[in-house]
Image (spheres, rainbow, N blue to C red):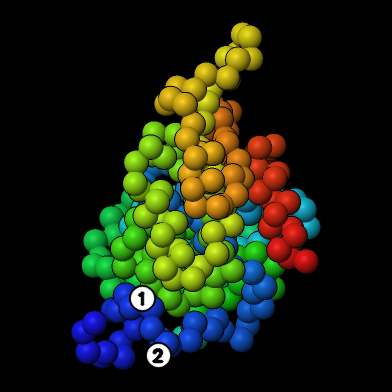
Amino acid sequence: MSECTHDCGSCDQNCSDRIMKEQTNEQNHIKHVIGVVSGKGGVGKSLVTSLLAVEMTRRGFKCGIIDADVTGPSIPKAFGITQKATGDENFLMPPVTKSGIPVMSVNLLLEDETDPVVWRGPVVAGVVKQFWKDVVYGDVDFMFVDMPPGTGDVPLTVFQSIPLDGIIIVTSPQELVGMIVNKAIKMAKLMDIPVIGVIENFAYAVCPDCGKHIEIFGKSHLDEIANKFRVAMLARLPMDPELARLTDEGRIEESHVDELKAAADILAVLAK
């Protein structure tokens, strides 16, 4: 092990001298923080984050979303948020969705949401910390953190700095045959972050004529991964054109995904 510089933000060692988790500001009362992660991009992580927040809000919980995927933000688009975040010299105030979910994303700070975020890792990680410390969310039962894919600077910053109660890993059938999901689970275990379970997206398509489930991307390996790492298999989500349409139109709060109810049940138990 190299000599300790006491700069935990740039260190990947899980030593006893690591600094305590960052505290949010005094305006917030956040009970549970759930990270939503993936081993690679394009598997529907942001979609699952949004759907979980919508489902838990329907159940009477107060939810918030931190869009920590700074270079690929998509949460505001799914909720149809067009207004920008506001603030003063002390705090930022996030926009709120139609059902009352405060959302913070870098797209809500950019003049044009299509402007690219060309920042290096430490700067991106600093923005995520600011979203946690300097944004006023108020009373929140569940804060969902939509994390960037992989095991780089920003996921490491979230794992080290934000007091996560657990993570949900989102994957797809073709990804499960490789080592990428294994890496995400092993990283969480290395950082002592509980893995709540795994959600498989794009699991199948439903034939509109006969209702048969067609596994377009091949046979699911979700059971194998769940058994290997002793994690819960939370859901298998179908390819749903109607859900895609609502998300593209910024109307994800109108969607109903029954397959996520088991995952929501587990979160509800956590709240108790």
- Residue farthest toward the top in the current orientation of the protein: 209
Residue type (three-letter) at the residue carrying disc 1: Gly
From the viewer's perspective, tell me whether residue 271 is left or right of residue 131: right
Element type at mark 1 = helix
Residue type (three-letter) at the residue carrying disc 2: Asp
Tell me: residue 28, above or below residue 96: below
Q: Which mark is residue 258?
A: none
- Residue farthest toward the front in the current orientation of the protein: 228
Q: Which mark is residue 126?
A: 1
Residue density around tag 2, few if under 14, some if 14–19, many if 20 or more, within 10 Å? few
Rendered image quadrant of residue 173:
top left
Tell me: residue 119, above or below residue 183: below
Quarter containing the N terminus:
bottom left
Q: Position of residue 130 (x, y in %)?
A: 44, 76
The disc, 1 or 2, on the residue closer to the chain's N-terminal end is 2
From the viewer's perspective, tell me whether residue 220 is left or right of residue 13: right
Rendered image quadrant of residue 117:
bottom left
Residue 246: tell me if it is visible.
no
Q: Nearer the viewer, residue 94 or 4?
A: 4
What residue did someone put label 2 on?
17
Which residue lies at the image location 67% right of the left edge and 78% below the top edge?
A: 29
Q: Position of residue 141 (x, y in %)?
A: 69, 67
Element type at mark 2 = loop
Tell me: residue 90, above or below residue 156: below
Q: Position of residue 61 (x, y in %)?
A: 74, 61
C-alpha span from label 1 to label 2: 21 Å
From the viewer's perspective, tell me whether residue 103 is left or right of residue 63: left
Which residue lies at the image location 28% right of the left edge and 73% below the top edge?
A: 122
Which residue lies at the image location 78% right of the left edge and 66% below the top edge?
A: 272
Q: Nearer the viewer, residue 130 or 76?
A: 130
Mark toward the viewer: 1 or 2: 2
